[in-house]
Image (cartoon, helix red, strand yellow):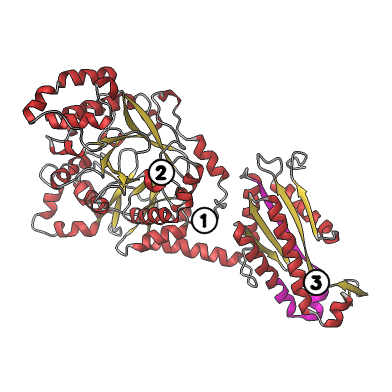
Amino acid sequence: MPDSPGLGFTVPRVNIVARDRERAEDRFDLPRLLAGIDRHVRFAYQPIVAIATGEVQGFEALLRGQEALGFARIPDIFDAAAEAGHLLAVEERLRARAVDGFATFGPALGARLFLNLDNRALTIGDGGLAALEAALARHGLGPQSVCLEIAEAQPLGGRELERLPPFRARSFALAIDDFGTGHSGLRMLYETQPEQIKIDRFFIAGIAQDNKRKLFLSTIVDLAHVLGISVVAEGVESEAEFLTCKEIGCDLAQGYFVGHPTQEVGGFTRASEIVAGVNRRDRRRQPSSDRYVRDTVQPINPIALGASMAEVLHYFQDHPDRAFVPVVDAENRPRGVIREALLKPHIYAPYGKDLIAHRRQGPKLAEFLDSCPICDVDTDLDKILETFAIDGNQVGVVIAERGRYLGVLDAAALLQALNERNLAFARDQNPLTRLPGNNSIGRYLGHAVEVETDAYLVAYFDLDHFKPFNDQFGFRGDRAIQMLADLLRTRAAPMGGFVGHVGGDDFFLGLRAPDRTQALGMIDRLLQDFAADMRNFYDDATRSAGFTIGLDREGRVTRFPLLACSAAIGWLPEGVRTVNLETVSRRLAALKKDAKQSPDRMAIREFSGEDQAGD
């Protein structure tokens, strides 16, 4: 757990001084405890946010005030209640108190309440299902407002598993808490089929510097996404941990870095400014040129989780060309799909169709609900394809935006998106160097100037005296262009740079938030190394003379220096821009002349306060 344990958190049992069950019941004063809960217990709520957007998706209820009840630790309450046979009564009262607090702010934010379950309570009566529904109904809330957290560290046998389907059938979401710390994590994942898993803090702590933790988390994230399960990184306490979880593909984050648990709920907002700020500063995030997912997504109307099977059958009758239909809850969150293939054995059995459509005696929609990969619309297309391809039995991928259903991509749509992206890239790619062309360069530079607030270094490279060299040596001109392209690729790659080919002998380089001194040093060495490499194209006499003789553009015999390269460099400081794309492009173009005349073949301009937009 990211903070201190809430409902259902287990530790080794306390040693209750009692020889048998009867004595424990005698010592356990249930009415007094329930009155004390009403009087002293409060809940702190810790936000759970979408990593990609910072939007608050839920709040975990964390119990406070157990000391006033005479318990040193939170788990002692549940152990004592279980020993005395009153666990469910205590669970129901605490769940109701958590709902009461959440109802004062959560619904207005469109968030879910994350409630911890004590797995032992599932075997008692209905597991508290009716009482929880009643607590929600008092505030006009439905089960879709709650995600129940199952503790992985607690035993979950056949009896407990039998009690989970009724919760799911009533639209409660399920999550496995502290995933990776119990004895049977993968088995529990298989048997419970939760909507979410929460990765324990043990695997998040220091993950930015720990390759083993990265490998574990990335493996679990890939598996979860194939199964249509979203992943919450618990206990995120630093920006480095947050960014690593984001890079690996976690969907949600919880922890001190995102937001502390608090009982002062008046300050909660729909989105986390901390996360939004980090995403703006994220140096690893590149401007997205991958619009093909959003353009290709199919806005198929979903089926509601509470719909009848008769409605499902009518859907497939009205859409005979569809192999599946997505299912969403009342908050439009994707919950899985129903495949037509799974219905056929029942439909074609004697009286099967009538039985399925029977509201009371027939099976429920939840019994046919199947998992399906779920990806955010801003997920890279290659990652979506990888998720889809891991399981060859998948019918498609459900696409969500900020956790809400947007549409689907079936196999044909995925291939269409991939084909359109590849064609667009091929059209923009320079055939000689295979580098991105002007469209990609324009998107990158526009994003750096007019969207981002991080520092950027942007530069245009131009070969000096290329025409006479190309006239004299012919095909060697293409070789010189390829050499410069290779140098830019290899030198910029370690710094996460973007390299583009404007055309001819002109190139572009972009570096996001680099060390300025290091970046300028890299460019200086690149220019020197290129000039040194090009000397090998000339004979000894020409190298000794340091020039060639050829015709200038007016047809006059002229001496030309040996082929070299110059760089016009622009520095965009961190902060809100005071320039626009047109201004930066125009001034960098004018700076090329200064670069060619400079002894080190570099000219630098900083676009600061005096560079007003549009001047």
Asked whether the viewer can see residue 137, the reply is: no
Disc 2 from disc 1: Cα separation:
22 Å
Instruction: Give the residue number, with chain letter if any, for mark 2.
Output: 252
User: For residue 563, which numbered disc appears in the image?
Assistant: 3
Count of labels in the image: 3
- Write down the quadrant of residue 262 in the picture: top left
- Residue under the image location 48 percent in, 35 percent down: 272
In screen coordinates, is 57 left or right of 173?
right
Please say if 40 is above or below 319. Answer: above
Q: Amino acid at mark 2?
A: Leu
* Type of amino acid at the residue the image marks with label 1: Asp
Which one is earlier in the sequence, the residue at label 3 or at label 2?
2
What stretch of residues is rendered in magenta? 455-482
Judged from the image, the secondary structure of the residue bearing numbered disc 1 is loop
Which residue position holds label 1? 290
Residue 458 on the magenta segment: yes
